[in-house]
């Protein structure tokens, strides 16, 4: 990967109109990011485009600004949008709308978001009024097409954002069908973290000689964040460790494996005096948006989320990501971790684990291209801020080739990293936040339930 040029072209040199440039300035965007400088010229020329870029790098405007430039000056017919942006989640649809809508307004273009979990009436009314750009999840969009509320005859540009996540969620057939309904002469842009499997099938079927911008290989997404593994004795210590981390890092996201776990852990944080919200599929869209706004506005210091929200959380200044439950694989690890260290900021990622799971975590982080510091909860300095963690711990142990589910973790007995032996009598034992009953050590799932019923 070549280094970006020292001289970054201005938005004017990239061909954007004075109205768009002025609108960008109003939201304090005055210089293109490297992704935007690379992608915008090809996108403005109408070429099909295949892009891979780090979350938080400005990729939304990299494809959004050329769309505005192409559509400005004309009006769309009722139910006949001219640009389509397909995204995997409701949260990402909202994020894309927030990034593009103020700029679209500046050039008198109308943008509509379309996704499930919300009433049809408002969406159909906006489409009848002549929407220029539709940002949509696949299911609701196809439903509106089938009902005659939206047609693709006038589509000039189609974007698939986070195409790999669309495929991971099982949307390949729906996306493939939607693309087949758009004019073959239209421009198509696909952005994805990976370019294999079903993503490659979409590229081969629907893009014509695309220009490729691979600006973020997987390892490039982890260079501005510190990675840590925090080894604890059992579930009770996991909750106490997570609480200590959040108290020391008040802009954090914690990931759990299950929806129930996200609700319970957020309630445990609240019981300990920490402002927390949860985000998962059991919540209505209204509640999800409310909780995310509570966090993004600073009224909550942590959001506890499941993997379904890993790509949908786009909030600035998140300093810490905690994997309370380990992610399923290296790809999920990178997507979760990408909620911090956005747009050049620094951040930290902590995976909380028991000794039994250390080998698995080490192998997963190796596949993700991550080098992590390892810490023992009993000896890690407090408070556990990003700076404190960076100055303590040891290098990762070598994963053993033993039986799956076991660990040869002895740890390097250096500063803050004494080998963690799962000994119930060793070291202080924390009762954890109120609302949890302690469970047996090494339990792979939630060992207790809060004393009050989940929301």
Image (cartoon, grey):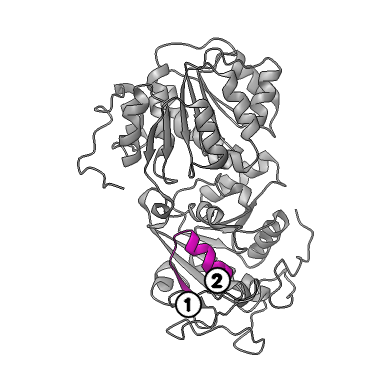
The residue range painted magenta reads 360-374
- Does the segment drawn in magenta span residue 373? yes
Proximity of marks 2 and 1: CB atoms separated by less than 8 Å? yes
The spot of residue 36 in percent (x, y) is: 34, 36
- Does the segment drawn in magenta span residue 200? no
For mark 1, give the secondary structure: loop
Q: Is residue 94 visible?
A: no
Q: Residue extending furthest bottom?
A: 425
- Tag 2: Cα neighbours inside 10 Å, few (<14), some, or many (≥20)? some
Front-most of residues 44 and 206 = 206
- Tag 1: Cα neighbours inside 10 Å, few (<14), some, or many (≥20)? few
Front-most of residues 15 and 167 = 167
Question: 120 above or below 237?
Answer: above
Residue 382 circle label: 1
Left/right placement of residue 124 relative to residue 183 reads right
Left/right placement of residue 178 relative to residue 37 reads right
């Amino acid at each position: 990967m070549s280094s970006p040029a020292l001289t970054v072209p201005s938005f004017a040199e990239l061909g954007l109109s004075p109205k768009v440039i002025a609108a960008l300035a109003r939201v304090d965007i005055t210089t293109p990011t490297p992704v935007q400088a690379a992608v915008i010229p090809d996108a403005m020329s109408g070429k099909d485009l295949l892009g891979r870029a780090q979350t938080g790098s400005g990729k939304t405007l990299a494809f959004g600004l050329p769309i505005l430039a192409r559509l400005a000056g004309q009006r769309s017919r009722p139910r006949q949008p001219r640009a389509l942006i397909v995204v995997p989640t409701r949260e990402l649809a909202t994020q894309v709308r927030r990034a593009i809508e103020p700029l679209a307004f500046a050039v008198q273009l109308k943008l509509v978001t379309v996704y499930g979990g919300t009433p049809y009436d408002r969406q159909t009314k906006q489409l009848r009024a002549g929407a220029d750009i539709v940002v949509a999840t696949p299911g609701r969009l196809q439903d509106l097409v089938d009902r005659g509320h939206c047609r693709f005859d006038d589509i000039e540009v189609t974007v698939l954002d986070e195409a790999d996540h669309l495929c991971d969620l099982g949307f390949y057939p729906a996306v493939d069908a939607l693309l087949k309904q758009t004019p073959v002469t239209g421009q198509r842009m696909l952005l994805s973290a990976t370019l294999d499997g079903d993503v490659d099938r979409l590229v081969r079927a629907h893009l014509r000689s695309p220009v490729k911008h691979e600006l973020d290989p997987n390892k490039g997404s982890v260079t501005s964040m510190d990675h840590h593994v925090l080894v604890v004795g059992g579930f009770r210590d996991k909750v106490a460790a997570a609480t200590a981390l959040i108290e020391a890092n008040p802009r954090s996201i914690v990931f759990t494996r299950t929806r129930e776990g996200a609700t319970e852990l957020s309630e445990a944080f609240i019981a300990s005096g920490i402002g927390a919200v949860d985000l998962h599929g059991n919540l209505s869209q209204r509640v999800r948006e409310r909780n995310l706004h509570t966090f993004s506005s600073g009224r909550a210091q942590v959001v506890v989320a499941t993997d379904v929200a890993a790509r949908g959380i786009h909030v600035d200044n998140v300093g810490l990501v905690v994997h309370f439950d380990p992610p399923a694989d290296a790809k999920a690890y990178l997507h979760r971790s990408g909620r911090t260290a956005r747009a050049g900021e620094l951040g930290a990622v902590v995976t909380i684990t028991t000794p039994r799971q250390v080998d698995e975590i080490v192998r997963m982080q190796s596949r993700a291209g991550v080098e992590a510091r390892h810490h023992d909860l009993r000896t890690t300095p407090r408070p556990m801020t990003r700076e404190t963690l960076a100055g303590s711990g040891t290098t990762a142990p070598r994963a053993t080739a033993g039986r799956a589910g076991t660990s040869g973790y002895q740890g390097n007995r250096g500063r803050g990293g004494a080998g963690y032996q799962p000994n119930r009598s060793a070291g202080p034992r924390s009762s954890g936040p109120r609302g949890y009953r302690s469970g047996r050590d090494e339990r792979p799932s939630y060992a207790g339930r809060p004393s009050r019923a989940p929301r």
